[in-house]
Each structure stands twice: as C-alpha cells, then as structure tokens.
Image: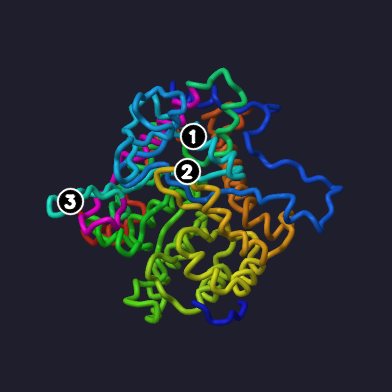
Amino acid sequence: MIMFRKAAGMGLLTAIFLAGCSQPGVKGPAGSPSQSNPGTKKAAVSSAVPDRFSDAHVHLIDFLQNGAFDNADGFFKGIGSRGEIKGSKAVRYLALPFGEQWRRLSLLFRDMAASGVDHAMVSGMPFLKKWSENEPFARPRYYLDSSSRVVRARDTDYLIGAAFLEYRRKFSGDAGALARLDSLSPFICGFDGTDLGAVDLVVKRIKEFPGVWKGIGEVMSRHDDLTNLTIGDRPRGNHPALKRLCRFAGEVNLPVSIHHNIAPVSRSSSEVKEPVYLDELVDLFAYCPDTKFIWCHAGISRRVVVGNLPHWLDAVLDQFGERVYIDLSWVVFEDYILKDLDAWAELVRSHPGNFMLGSDVVGSSANLGKELRRYKPFLEKISTDPEDPARRNLARDNFSRLDSALGQKRRARMVAQKLIPGSSRATGLVLPHDYDFPENAHTGALKDSFIRKHRP
C-alpha cells in the first residue's frame, strides 16, 4: 500500500439483433481512435494529438424519464433539434414515442464524434422525481430541485432497449451505422436494489431485449439525498438483494456499476467523516468473487467529506484490484482530485488498470466533451504525452478493455450454448429461454430457515 499525503434458443428479437451485428472487415465506428504516426515528435504530441476518451457513465434519460434525441430533420414540428420543448423555462424534452427511440442513439453518436469519445456506457435513469402538490410553484427536473420524493422507475430500461432494437431496424442496410453500436455498452438500471426479486426483473429485461445488454448499473446504493428521498426501503451495498443480483452478474459476465458513498454527508466542508459505509461495499466485493465492479465517483457525492481518500481507494484496490474499477466522474474531480493532483496521479500510476473517466451527463450528451476535457490538468499530471499508456488507460483504454474482455467471455458462452452462431461477433447478453435464477440462492436468512430444514 502506498502512503499518501492527507487530502480531502433464438427468437425474433435475437434474430433482429444478430442481423445488425457488425461483420468482419466493416469499418469501425465513427470517431474510433486513429493509429498514431510513429514519426510524430514527442515534444509536440501534447498539443497536436488530443486525448481520445471512453465514457464510463452516461445517462440518456433524465429524472422525468425523457431525454435528448436527434430531431435535426424536423420530424417533430415545433420541437428543437435536440428534442427540447421550446418555451420551457428549464430544459425539458419531448416524450419520444416508440418507433422513434433510435433517435437517442443517433444524437449520441454525433456528440461522441464531436467530443473525441470512442466508447461509452449508456443507461437510463432508475428514478422519477415526483412533482408534489406541496411544491406546485415549479416542476422539478432534478432530484435536488425540491424536497418532493423520488420513486423508482422500473420501465426506464425499455427506453434504452427499444433504442437499440429500433436503431438496428432503422439502419439494417447500413453496415457503417450498425458498426457504431459496437462503441456502446448499454447497462440495465431500472430495479429496486432492496427487492430480493430484483435479479428476476433484470433477467426479464435481458430476455425482452436479447443481445442488447452489456452491464448492470448505475446501481443506486447509498446516495445521500437521492436515496433518502426515495420512497421505500433504503439500499446499501451488502443488502441481500444486491448480493443476489451481483452474483448473477458474475455468473453471466456482466459488469456492475454501483454508486455507494464511502461516508455519510457532512454538515460543512470542515466536518471530516470516517468512511463508515465502506465496510458494506467491501462485503459485497468479497461476496462476489466472479463479478467485476465499477465504483462510481470513487465513493464521493455532494457534501461527502473524508480524509485521505486516495489512501482508502488504494487499500480497496490492493485487495480487490483484479475485479474493482474506479469511475472518476461528477463531483470527485473538483472536490478531491483537483485539490491534490500529485497524490491522485500517484494513485493512478500505482493502479494503472483500475481507473476510468465518466461524464455522468443526465438526459443529454451535449456536454460529453466538456465534462471529460476538464480532466486535462489531471491527465497532464500523469503524463504530458497523450499516447503514454498510463494516461491513455485512464482516458480511454481501461473501460474499453474491461468491456471487451467480458464481452468475449459472454460471446464464448453464448456460442457454446448455441444461442448465437459461431460466426457472430455479438457480445450483448442472450440467455436461454428457460433460464431462471435459483429462487432461494443468496437470500441470507431464508437459506438457513429452521422451518424449512425441519418441515415434516
């Protein structure tokens, strides 16, 4: 451990999916990384070659269960080119009908190309912000816009799954357009992390959209105001429902992106808290030895103040580095990284394969580039050369490498189970039609039921 200075069977949908998979020899997605020129002088490389990125954290849907989409063709009259409702004081998006969900991906690809993003994790939003009659003066768009409660949005994954299937149908004759889908990793997020049946809902979504999903998350565990505002039970990292879900994820080689604050919120920036929630997350990591985890925001959220955060991350990675990755996104950059670039650069160099960047945009990909480029001082601290492996790993390769490795494992399993043909390059998960997660697996006390054991 490093010592750090203290600092704050094939059905119709499966066939549609396979028909859209890119074929060998098809040109890669727009915005894919170009090969570096060996003749380029290293002295000029920093200014001449911009960083290429993978984005490990994109929400295409907002807290109203809508989001931006490509309306550049004016198909929806009176609506903005990115699907925004004109005349609204706050940006709101048109409710996009099924059959047109592909437009979300069309816009995302355009924003990725403009931002130098080669690969992105995409998900919906597992919550819907309630507009309470006690606060009728302004409709909330964000979970902190008012004190009204938040409800779980179990159908958010339909919007993402439909976008992928519709895109494949829309561009079924365009090999280049279909190849762009290889640059996206859709994750399932619309479930209740305190429901022992959450894993069954995830299995259901996988069967409903075969060949689409490549991960699970952003799973909401301890998330300060958000989980406190959510109606129902409070989630935690080692809740039996999440243990069941994450064991399933390991079984089928789906990575799990999880938001779990390392500590409770502080009343002020000077109130330093012990990382008392870390034990719960470590318990989950230990319980799921075959599961790859992406820990969102390095365990940080608004008003979470802990001492020597690099030390705690280093300790976690020393023990679980083979299966735990750290997503650097949202407030962790301003609140922690920017305040001690040296310590964080040392941490990343010590675990070069474990850190990745995310924009954490919500409902719109317009700010992908802005959110990722703000890490430039940090990337420059790691190396002034964008082609340096340590810098490139953080900016792009770690997330892409993880996605590719797990994708090949899924593909091999699906080929062996004859769920996809051996010639297919598909890596989105397909499950056998009769698959069920064992009813009593990993249910905690239920497994050791005295009644069940001694029933006559």
Residue 289 sits above or below residue 255 on the image = below
Residue 44 picture location, percent across and down: 79, 55
Pick the front one: 443 or 301: 301
Earlier residue among tags 3 and 1: 1
What's the distance in space between the residues labelled 3 and 1, CA to CA? 32 Å
Rendered residue at 83%/50% (across/down): 40
Q: Is residue 124 visible?
A: yes
Secondary structure under tag 2 reads loop
Q: Are marks 2 and 1 in contact (CB under 8 Å)?
A: yes
Q: Amino acid at mark 3?
A: Phe
Q: Which residues are magenta?
A: 142-169
What's the distance in space between the residues labelled 2 and 3, CA to CA? 28 Å
- What residue is disc 3 on? 137
What's the distance in space between the residues labelled 2 and 1, CA to CA? 8 Å
- What residue is disc 1 on? 107
Rendered residue at 51%/45% (across/down): 121
Between disc 2 and disc 3, the foreground one is 3
Q: Is residue 150 left or right of residue 351?
A: left
Q: Is residue 155 magenta?
A: yes
Q: For the residue carrying disc 3, how many other residues have a C-alpha within 10 Å: few (<14), some (14-19), or many (20+)?
A: few
Between disc 3 and disc 1, the foreground one is 3
